[in-house]
Amino acid sequence: MRFILPLVWFSCGTLLALPARAADVPDPASTPAAQLQLESLAASVSHFATLDLIRHREPDSRLPANLLAEQKQLAATLRSMGGEHDGLLGLLVHPNPKVRTLALGALFEREDPKDLPAIASLMGDSAPTLPLLHMAATSQGGELPLADFEEPQTVGLVAKEMICFYLAAAKIDVPGLRKDPFALTVVEIPRLSAAFKEYWTVRANRDHCASWFLVKFQRATRDTDPVLFENRADAGRVLAEMQALPPAERAWTELYVLAGAFSASAFGPGNSIQPLTDEGDRVTALQAVGPEAILNFLQRHKVTDDPDLLFDDNAIRNVYRKDQFLAMAQFILQHPQSLLRTDDTNAVTALAEAPPEKQQGDTALWLAAGAALMAEHNPTQAAAMLKADLKKYPYTSSTAGTQQARLMAELWRSRGSAENDALVAWFYEAAVHTYGENDPSNGPVNFLREIALSPRPDTRELLSALVGSPHFQLSDWAILKELLHLAATVQGADLVDQRTIYDYQPNSRRPDEAAVLASWRSLLQKSFAKVD
């Protein structure tokens, strides 16, 4: 018999548990194993690493050795108790707060969202429980004293962290959710309870939601970027679960999860997720959705019944949901010719001009995607549009170089060496406004990085034009580094060893820096001398 913990919502939004009715008490024959096991654990373990359990990762390796071993074994034991579901639910009303805490941990390890109301019912439980172990705030190596890891916690704080993890995956903004990741969230119970009530109302009857898969994926990857080799198998199993969904749901869910786990870093060659799933497979999955639905998504219309995938005007007032939408849109806009139609040019371009309250993030990305669609039938007009759009990003803007680089990279992709004169002129004009490798407005560096990811047969001709320009002497270490990287891609071999390149970065203060950089310029000019 499944035990259901009775819940009641009060007008203030606080979720409280009522005493169980006699009819709700689980059959004693089904609970002794779980009860005896958790009571024994409660008497023997000394701490509960809440945040590590939630993210399914090992505790800080600098913990005292005995505690590190204890917590690893505790997590493994709680994971093994998933089959004791009814018994675990019944233990949420156990008189010992340590047992209630351990029952919460075992339930959370099951990764079954249907248990969330039962977990949420303990958010108001103020009983002190097993002390928290978290990551030490210091970067000091070696075993550290217990005081660097230990904090008091209540049963309610454990339950709050678990609920907050699910709400954060759904990009629901509750004050206090996104604080120091190694400190327990402190939020007002009524506000958090009200947020959970709203969250659960639209998800209670669903079999799956995109954010539930994001929770699974974040736990499978241990919430790290990039995915460590030893965690790839776990991440692969979650990806396989998503791929088993109906085609349209699979496409949107997978895009939501990868964007939510890695943001922009999930997309493009060399990305964080590439070892697990091919970028082409994600494009193919979205093609099954169809261009009309994809355009509707970009216009923030409803494309599925999943509440996690609703990005209307009201939703994107929440900055976290807006960021999630933009990260998903970025992947689509990086593949416009595969996912949209030529006739969508004006609609995509118009989205770049949205009013401030509906701002679409990096507007140059939208303009470049629109130009890419136009280039399919009128490349000359697309080129003219890209050049004109440069004026929308004056150098007085802190991100002008980055946005200009997007437009010029699209000009290169669509027109190639036919636009070398315009590209070279822009490149060295932008170089005057560059302040170093890490400057977000470093147009030439961003441009060369995009070119390296967009190979064309005439890339050598572009390199010849760049190094053959009389302005080539303006190229500093940051630009030379990217030119040498691009040259290695074209030549199939390094012109200069990568370690040597980084040995001469500006902060190295080598006395022969000027001479070495001059030799790199000469090598590039010799290797890519223009042949008439």
Image: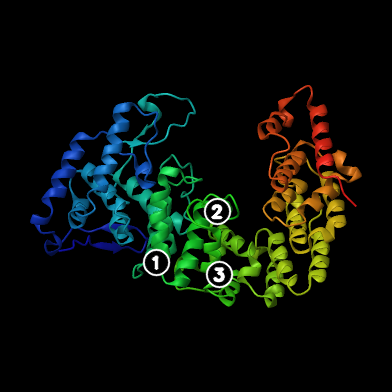
Residue lying at 91% horizontally and 43% vertically, measured from the top left: 470
Tell me where residue 343 sits by quadrant.
bottom right
Which residue is situated farthest in the top direction here?
511
Residue matched to label 1: 244
Residue matched to label 3: 312
Mark 2–mark 1 Cα distance, whole angstroms, equals 21 Å
1 and 3 marks in contact (CB < 8 Å): no
Q: Is residue 451 above or below residue 73?
A: below
307 or 381: which is nearer to us?
381
Q: Is residue 267 above or below residue 435?
A: below
Give the amino acid type for the residue marked by disc 2 in the picture.
Ala
Mark 1–mark 3 Cα distance, whole angstroms, equals 28 Å
Mark 2–mark 3 Cα distance, whole angstroms, equals 24 Å
Numbered label attached to residue 266: 2
Q: Looking at the rendering, in which quadrant would you find the N terminus?
A: bottom left
149 to the left or right of 172: left
Give the amino acid type for the residue marked by disc 1 in the picture.
Ala
Give the amino acid type for the residue marked by disc 3 in the picture.
Asp
Residue lying at 69% horizontally and 45% vertically, measured from the top left: 492
Tell me where residue 471 sits by quadrant.
top right
Give the mark nearer the N terminus: 1 vs 3.
1
523 or 81: which is nearer to us?
523
